[in-house]
């Protein structure tokens, strides 16, 4: 982890942050204020940025790569709730507001780079910038709505239907997510996903 100010690629990273869905409309002075608190984290495939059940939470702005939000049971069985890629974000905002441990982990699906800051500092920033706070809370609610829709989909659609829905909703991710990860997200075996592809069902 390196502070943005001291990162050797800080100019490139600042340009990437300007593309982020939550930060693109900030003024230069507001962005400079936020950037003072940002650290840059590089993760490899499978690395945890956030572990399920912790109370020390971060706000993540994705610069490169793909992350997944996952829930695991004590036996290690995992359910993927969502994927997020460049210009998107990850957060545990609801857990912090509710005073509960984070109910999920955040894991690198691919090699990834994020800019992060403690979630409490991000909330303090939002409290000083109502426009950014409104956009952020809308993004959180939209993400929760998407997760709910996905969970319903797992029960209502057959295997090809689940794959087709994902391809329609997330065409930018279809060729970037490993088949094993995509199959897990869609509650399929990797073999079933491969068989559907070979039979031309998807």
Image: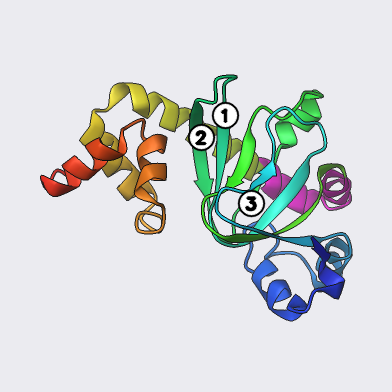
Residue 144 in the image: state x and y as whole percent.
Answer: 57, 33
* Quadrant holding the N terminus: bottom right
What separation in Å lies between label 1 and label 3 (alpha carbons)? Answer: 18 Å
Query: In this figure, which residue is indicated by the disc labeled 2?
Result: 81
What separation in Å lies between label 2 and label 3 (alpha carbons)? Answer: 14 Å
Query: In this figure, which residue is indicated by the disc labeled 3?
Result: 89
What separation in Å lies between label 2 and label 1 (alpha carbons)? Answer: 7 Å
**Start-end of magenta stretch:** 121-137
Q: Is residue 130 magenta?
A: yes
Left or right: where 160 falls relative to 85: left
Contact, CB < 8 Å: mark 2 with mark 1?
yes
Residue 14 found in image quarter: bottom right
Residue 146 in the image: state x and y as whole percent.
Answer: 49, 36
Q: Earlier in the sequence, mark 2 or mark 1?
A: 1
Mark nearer the viewer, 2 or 1: 1
- State the SS at label 1: strand
* Residue under the image location 53 percent in, 55 percent down: 66
Out of 86 and 48, give the one closest to the viewer: 48
């Amino acid at each position: 982890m390196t502070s943005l100010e001291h990162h050797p690629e800080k100019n490139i990273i600042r340009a990437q942050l300007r593309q982020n869905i939550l930060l693109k409309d900030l003024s230069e002075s507001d962005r400079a204020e936020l950037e003072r608190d940002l650290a840059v984290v590089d993760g490899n495939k499978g690395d945890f940025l956030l572990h399920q059940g912790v109370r020390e939470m971060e706000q993540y702005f994705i610069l490169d790569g793909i992350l997944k939000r996952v829930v695991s049971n004590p036996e290690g069985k995992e359910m993927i709730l969502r994927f997020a890629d460049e210009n998107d974000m990850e957060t545990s905002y609801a857990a912090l507001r509710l005073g509960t441990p984070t109910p999920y982990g955040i894991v690198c699906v691919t090699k990834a780079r994020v800019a992060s800051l403690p979630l409490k500092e991000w909330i303090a920033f939002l409290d000083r910038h109502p426009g950014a706070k409104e956009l952020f809370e809308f993004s959180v609610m939209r993400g929760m709505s998407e997760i709910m829709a996905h969970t319903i989909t797992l029960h209502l659609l057959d295997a090809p239907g689940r794959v087709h829905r994902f391809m329609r909703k997330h065409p930018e991710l279809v060729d970037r997510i490993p088949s094993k990860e995509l199959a897990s997200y869609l509650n399929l075996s990797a073999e079933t996903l491969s068989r559907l592809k070979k039979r031309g069902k998807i």
